[in-house]
Structures are given as structure tokens and as C-alpha cells.
Amino acid sequence: MHRPDPLRWLWYSLGGGLPPEYREWVLHDVTCRTWSLRQALRSLLVVAPLVVAVLIFVPGPFWIRGISALGGIIMGLIYSLGYLIETTEHRLVKAGYPVGTGERVREQRQTHVRSEAVARRRQKMFARMDRRTGR
């Protein structure tokens, strides 16, 4: 799995597509354990230049510019999180995967994690029962 260089990653973060050799990385990026956090951080990256521009170039008291920038950040996050699934699916389609791949892979991984947790709980429960009975 190839990770994109910083310039390609920036292009990808701004919504651009990556060459085919990054296909597996895109799947990992939008289905790993921290996929939603990654998307939220990418949306902050997109909003950051606008926030800086508001803070530096808009005339008026700094507290008003700061609150305006904060409002922009909050609205950007609301929008980004509201379309989280659709955005990640679109990234996967651009990488050549069929629609629904992201949701299916995340669901399979979650099922696997849950079944492992259940197995660990059962093992602990049986170990406690064995200690109580003296086995």
C-alpha cells in the first residue's frame, strides 16, 4: 500500500483524485478505525485558509473576526460531518471501487471487532468460573 506524498495528499484532501497506485490507501483511509476523524480534520484543512483570511484581512475588532471565524469552522464541520458517508463513498468511487464499498468494509470490520470482543468476554467469564470451582 503506497501512501501519497504531501502534495498529492493535499490534492486528495481538497477533493482531487489520486493515481491508481494509491487505490488501496484510499480504501484504508476511508475505512480504518479513525476514518471519521480523518475526514473531519480534512474539512478543517479546507476551511483553514478562509479562517486565516478572515482573521487577517477583514476590518473590525478582533473578537468579531474571531467569532466569525469560529462560526465558519463550526458550519464547515457540521456540513462535513453531515455528508461524511457520501464524501467517503465518492472518494472510493474516484479510486475505482463500486458504490457502497466503504460502508460494507466498515461494517465487516466492525463485525469482526465485535466478535473478538465477545470471545474475549467469554474467555474471561469461563476463566473466572474455573477459578471459583477450583479447576
Image (cartoon, grey):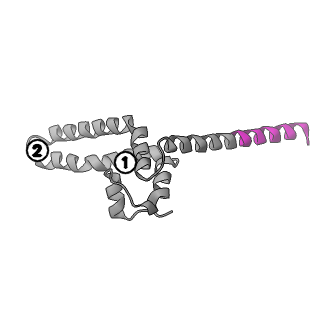
Where in the figure is residue 34, as x and y percent of width and height?
48, 47
As drawn, the label of residue 49 is none
Q: Is residue 62 magenta?
A: no
Q: Which residue position is annotated with label 2?
A: 58
Task: Label 1, secondary structure: give it.
Answer: helix
Picture residue at 36% right of the left edge, 55% below the top: 17
Mark closer to the chain start, 1 or 2: 1
Where in the figure is residue 29, as x and y percent of width and height?
46, 52
Task: Label 2, secondary structure: give it.
Answer: loop
Left/right placement of residue 93 relative to residue 47 reads: right
Q: Amino acid at mark 2?
A: Val
Picture residue at 35% right of the left edge, 49% below the top: 42
Magenta segment, which residues? 118-135
Q: Nearer the viewer, residue 76 or 90?
A: 90
Q: Is residue 128 magenta?
A: yes
**Mark-to-mark CA distance, 1 and 2:** 25 Å
Left/right placement of residue 33 relative to residue 119 reads: left
Snapshot quadrant of residue 111: top right
Where in the figure is residue 106, as x and y percent of width and height?
54, 43
Picture residue at 46% right of the left edge, 57% below the top: 23
Residue 80 makes an appearance in the image:
yes
Q: Which residue position is annotated with label 1?
A: 41
Picture residue at 38% right of the left edge, 44% below the top: 40
Q: Quadrant of the C terminus?
A: top right
Q: Amino acid at mark 1?
A: Leu
